[in-house]
Image (cartoon, rainbow, N blue to C red):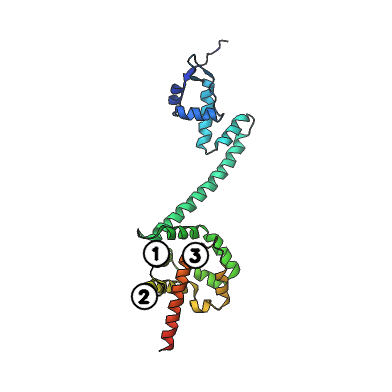
Amino acid sequence: MSNISKRYYSAGSFAKLTSTTKRTLHYYDNKGLLKPSGYNEKGYRSYSDDDLFRLHQILTLKYLDYSLDEISEYLEQDAKDFNTSLKLQYELLLKKQQHTQRIVDTVERAIAIMDDNDTIEPELIMVMIRSIQHEQEQKQWLSDHLPEELVQSMLMSELSSDEQIQVNRELMIAYNDLLAMYKQGLPPEHPLVQEPVLAIKLLLEQLLGHSLQELATNETGKVLKDLDTQLFPNFEPDFMNYFSEALVHLLRRMWEEKMNE
């Protein structure tokens, strides 16, 4: 039986043949994934048909989203059950797909809430995205600590998706206006500051189904004060103190106006 001689390729020819680059081949060499079969008289790397088969394996596994460490492990274990490995990889890819879809949904909602408003401050957008990220955990926590009717109201369950986006958009705009005034140094009692604070108050009362004055004294208010900031992200403390001062001033003024009626 005649022996079929192996073909050998220079690094450039081998890279071109496999639609990779010499830099990638060098990287795989350093990682121990694909060592050249030899070196020519000038010291340049040389690859054989056996190397071609191995590289095809590497590229196939890479396409299937195996990590380089996982590829290395597979190539070192000839007896490994690839069918089992492929099924496990499928499960991992499904989880990654689900995670990616959640990110896409989060970004879509954030964009819808911003409604092409380029003036929204980045820190507000970050808080909004973090809140959407923990939405399921928030629902569970609220359900464990508050009456179901209140939880459904806070989650705007009876509103359509468009209506929910509109409420969130109005809240975002009001907070954004307030943040701009905070950065300008306007005092909390300034009339311009009081406008977005009033808007926020009314929207929060709509969601909570209680006035903020009631929440200051009842059990629901006590629960809401203990919200985990990791689960329910909030704005920076200085800004929240500013908002609290402005809100206290608003409530005091409303009480005085009511008493003078």
**Residue 183 shows which numbered tag?**
1
Question: Is 116 above or below relative to 193?
Answer: above
Residue 135 visible in the snapshot: yes
Extreme residue in the bottom direction: 261
Residue drawn at x 54%, y 29% is: 30
Q: CA distance from mark 1 to mark 3?
A: 14 Å
Q: Position of residue 258 (x, y in %)?
A: 43, 86
Residue 210 visible in the snapshot: no
Is disc 3 placed on a helix, strand or loop?
A: helix
The answer to which of 212 and 178 lies nearer the viewer is: 178
Name the N-terminal-most of marks 1 and 3: 1
Residue drawn at x 62%, y 29% is: 76
Q: CA distance from mark 2 to mark 3?
A: 22 Å
Q: Which residue is mark 3?
A: 237
The amino acid sitting under disc 1 is Lys
Is disc 2 placed on a helix, strand or loop?
A: helix
Name the image quarter holding residue 182.
bottom left
The answer to which of 231 and 60 lies nearer the viewer is: 231
Q: Which residue is mark 2?
A: 191
Q: CA distance from mark 1 to mark 2?
A: 16 Å
Name the N-terminal-most of marks 1 and 2: 1
Q: Position of residue 248 (x, y in %)?
A: 46, 76
The amino acid sitting under disc 2 is Pro
